Image (tube, rainbow, N blue to C red):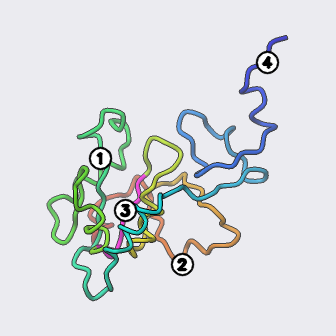
Amino acid sequence: LKLHCKDHIAHSIFLTTEAFTPGCGPSCFSPWKDAVIPGHIDLDRLQTIKSYNRPTSERSLIFNFHGRLPVNHDYYENVTVRRAILAFDSLPDVSVGGFIEDYFEVMGKSHFCLIPEGTSSWTNHLYESFFAGCVPILLSDRFVLPFQELIDWQRLSIRWPQDAVSAELYAY
């Protein structure tokens, strides 16, 4: 009798950076037994991000997102929420697009940081937003956030339906 590792998933306990794991499905995470833990940001990156954190009165951007998108990375071709973000590119006081050198400065000048679903089971964008001082706007219906029994995520973030990313979000 030959067993496959997937035969043991339902009986294993997982520590994961987020509960949604593309390509694996619900069998990879069970809230009653598994734990979601925060992702990792190295100390140098964290300190650089914090150095650009500005007071609210000095923030000139409503929101931002810079990173992998369908236009700059083929692997994201089917990630519709990231494609929808591109529609904000022409709006005033918004900074969205691919990778940029002054990304941390842009985050520090933004009131909100968009945190879209991606292709992996976690994203640094959520944790970077805390150190940049911008309020995370979660654009994923499937993220299960870490330490939900300890952190009141509704008080420190906004969850927006990923299929409703439109001008309404900008107006909100």
Instruction: Report the quarter where the N terminus lies.
Output: top right
Of mark 3 and mark 4, the one earlier in the sequence is: 4
- Residue holding disc 2: 155
Instruction: Report the quarter where the C terminus lies.
Output: bottom left
Q: Is residue 98 left or right of residue 36?
A: left
Q: Which mark is residue 83?
A: 1
The residue under the point 51% across, 76% down is 156
Task: State which quadrant residue 125 falls in.
Answer: bottom left
Of mark 3 and mark 1, the one earlier in the sequence is: 1
Of mark 2 and mark 3, the one earlier in the sequence is: 3
Label 1 and label 4: CA atoms lie apart by 40 Å
Q: Secondary structure at mark 2?
A: helix
- Mark 3 residue type: Leu
Q: Which residues are magenta?
A: 110-116
Q: Position of residue 92 (x, y in %)?
A: 15, 70
Q: Secondary structure at mark 3?
A: strand
For mark 4, does the 10 Å Cα neighbourhood hold few (<14), some (14 to 19), or many (20 or more) residues?
Answer: few
Q: Position of residue 157 (x, y in %)?
A: 48, 71
Label 3 and label 1: CA atoms lie apart by 13 Å
Q: Is residue 127 left or right of residue 34?
A: left
Q: Which mark is residue 3?
A: 4
- Tell me whether circle 1 and circle 2 mark residues in contact (CB < 8 Å): no
- Mark 4 residue type: Leu
Report the residue that reaches farthest toward the bottom. Answer: 57
For mark 1, does the 10 Å Cα neighbourhood hold few (<14), some (14 to 19), or many (20 or more) residues?
Answer: some
Q: Please state which of the two labelled residues, at mark 1 or mark 4, is closer to the viewer.
A: 4
- Residue holding disc 3: 114
The residue under the point 38% across, 73% down is 50
